[in-house]
Image: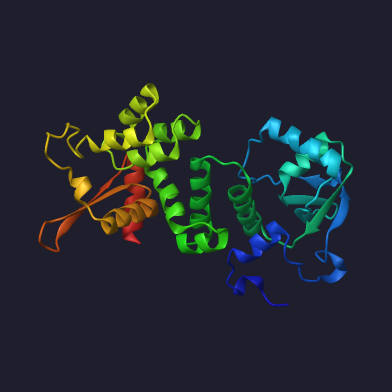
Amino acid sequence: MADKRSKPRGLGRGLSALMADVAPPATPGGAGQGDIRVPIERLIANPNQPRRNFDQNELENLAASIREKGILQPLIVRSVDGEKYEIIAGERRWRAAQMAQIHQIPVLVRDFDDAEVLEVAIIENIQRADLNAMEEAAGFRQLMDSFGHTQEKLATALGKSRSHIANLLRLLTLPVDVQDLLRDGRLAAGHARALITAENPSELAKLVVKNGLSVRATERLAKSVQPDTGKKEKPGRKSKVNTKDADTRALEGDLAAILRMAVSIEHEPGGEAGRMVIKYSSLDQLDELCNKLSR
């Protein structure tokens, strides 16, 4: 048998398993040849499932649908300990089926290793669950850090634009308190993106929440404060941020997404020289930056 580790592995296998749109290859003993039905008590949750919270109302609605129509799409599982099946994708359906008192569940058995199980679980959350922007960004970052996927590869495999992925990854450069506001729904992703290049995003975020500002108003607020000084701009004077071309802003965004820190690029007028400023918010981030630069 060929060693699976010798073959480059992309997102394709995980996605096809997740969507159950490709028949798995035949294996000795029949496992993986098609869906089978197993007693619900023989299924166990994935202990490394990235998604920890399941909305109770959504589970109840799904349980009601299962009572009426059954489980329309098999769960993806792998065999463990000979008698149990660990859920790779479909934990929400499994939980809802328990609420609906379903005794047997259709499953597709896959021979996945631990890394592939984690990868599919992350993909399922990104593709299926009603994630907020921070959860989706964390999922993309985990796929990149754990499996070496690039933004381009993720965009192609997941059917999302590269700019969508890059913009979400940039949110991870925001201070933790601003990320918490976004995670709790008190800030929208548009608000957060407007604050990424601001010198004091935490203070501005508090003003946005307190005054219920729109995204456009937040953008104006962020631009009205000069970087590095925190002072209001004088009338008739343009901000340096506004004079940057689209390519420079895109490069700043890409570098910020990779480094997970705020990045500012300033070209000297009329020349090819300039400076790039990387802002870290903690000594841990500084240590992480030093490690990346020394590789």
Residue at 65% x, 61% y is: 14
Say left or right for 33 vs 12.
Answer: right
Residue 64 in picture, x, y percent from top left: 80, 35
| Image coords of residue 72 (percent x, y) | 80, 50
Q: Measuring 18% from the left and 42% from the top, which residue is drawn there?
A: 239
In the image, 271 versus 77, the foreground residue is 271
Residue 196 visible in the shown view: yes
Kindly give the residue lying farthest to the bottom in the view shown.
Answer: 1
Relative to 149, does residue 127 appear above or below in the rendering? above
- Quadrant (top left/top right/bottom left/bottom right) for the N terminus: bottom right
User: Quick check: 164 left or right of 53?
Assistant: left
Q: Quadrant of residue 97?
A: top right
Residue at the image point whose x is 58% and y is 66% from the top? 10
Q: Quadrant of residue 98?
A: top right
**Side of 87 relative to 153 (left or right):** right
Give the image's coloring scheme.
rainbow
Q: Quadrant of residue 171?
A: top left
Left or right relative to 55: residue 176: left
The percent coordinates of residue 89 (x first, y second) are 70, 51
Which of the two residues, 156 or 2, is positioned nearer the viewer here?
156
Q: Is residue 282 visible?
A: no
Numbered-mark total: 0
**In which quadrant will I find the C terminus?**
bottom left
